[in-house]
Image (cartoon, grey):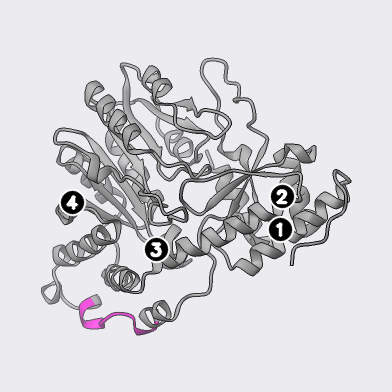
Amino acid sequence: MASTLTGHGLAIARSAEIDLGLGYPQVALPAWLREVLATGVDPDLAYSVPSKLSQAACDGELLEAACRCLRIDQRHAANGFVTFSGSVALDRVLVSQLGGGGSVVTTTPGVDMVTAMLSEHSGVEPVYVPAKAPGFDLDVDALAASLRADTRCIVLSSPDNPSGNVVAAPQLEALVALALEHGVTLVLDQCFALVDPAGIDVPVLADAAPPGLRWVMLWDTGKTFGLNHEKLGFAFCSPEVRSSVGERVNVLQSDVSRRQKLLFRAILDAAEANRWFDHLSELVATNLEVVRQACVDLPLEASSPDAGSLVLLDVTPAGLTAPVFADMLLADKEVGVIDGSDFFHPLAPSGALQPGHDHFVRVALARDPELVRRAMDKMVELCDELGDRPVVPALS
């Protein structure tokens, strides 16, 4: 099963004048990052015999750098893995926990990558728990009720994609208790955890996990740096699952290149020193305000994400469904946004989608503010042409 979300994102990237679809940052690289990329790494370390810098030492230094950025205890580096991407990390973790089949409990709305990955394995079933409308908050009680005897994993994201909601500390404590009670693995994808436009504290699983819990925390560099040809994924886990995850990682990849590991060790250290995460968060906050201000004069309603670099727009006040609005915006105004329907999944046992599944489009905010202003101007133009409100001046 292919990822519809990925397909739509790539189609937008190929044809849109303004791409607000893909969740990766698309911003001018800062001077410090250009310098790191231009400098590269020492060829003697990247390509010479292992004795120059052992693979274990190379991995350890990179994982420790990731721990520093995520502000988690560096002891977690000992139970961490480096992969080609965040998607690879998620796939390997799922495979490691589902060798005998079973079910995986996750949420709707949520990214379709979990569905796409699970569809490749017989005997494995995703169980979707609807988030609470209208803000799509996590429903811990409904999630608990969805656990079955064959449940192997709970898979969630925080900040969530697409809503930007964060699993708050009390919710995380409840999830930990559930996972311990039922003996399931708690997997939390935290790829947006360092993008914090509202300045809230994003709880991370590594800090909340008690001894004995089977857990995995995922993070990747793509949602933070947006380097199209340079990215890595990370999986930090408990000792209880380290061996099984490591075995499955090694099946897929003999190893990420040493050059890539050394490069990102330098990038992560430089990013911390240059306050890149604060800069990206401030940029997203600026663009979120641009979108909100535009929606004052538009028949659109912007959500209030807790963190991350995404915002949902409810397009039903414009008299359109999300698929139609997204198609018209791309075809008529060359602005690409993701149809929010991509994130909604069938509910058991009826197979129906929850109400409101076709109300939203997802807008990526890690962009140059002038680009976001132009995109919102074009939304104003489209809504004017639809005749759903009096004409107002375009945003300046």
| Residue type at tag 1 | Met
State if disc 1 and disc 4 touch (CB < 8 Å).
Answer: no
Q: Can residue 334 be seen here? A: no
| Magenta highlight range | 38-45
| Inter-mark Cα distance, 3 to 4 | 21 Å
In this view, the mark in front (1 or 2): 2
Give residue 363's position: percent from left, percent from top. 61, 52
Q: Position of residue 95 (x, y in %)?
A: 32, 38
- Closer to the chain start, of discs 3 and 4, is 4
> Where residue 389 appears, x then y in whole percent?
85, 46
* Residue 231 disc label: 3
**Label 4 crowd bin: few (<14), some (14–19), many (20+), radius 10 Å:** some
Q: Which residue is mark 4?
A: 76
- Image check: 28 left or right of 93? right
Crowdedness of circle 2 by 10 Å Cα count: few (<14), some, many (20+)? few
Q: Secondary structure at mark 1?
A: helix
Q: Nearer the viewer, mark 3 or mark 2?
A: 2
Query: Which numbered disc flags the more N-terminal residue, 3 or 2?
Result: 3
Task: State the mark number for residue 296.
Answer: 2
Q: CA distance from mark 1 to mark 2?
A: 11 Å
- Image position of 92 with respect to 355: above or below: below
The quarter of the image holding the C terminus is bottom right
For the residues marked 1 and 3, what is the alpha-carbon distance in whole angstroms?
30 Å
For badge 2, the amino acid type reads Val
Q: Nearer the viewer, residue 16 or 99?
A: 16
Q: Amino acid at mark 4?
A: His
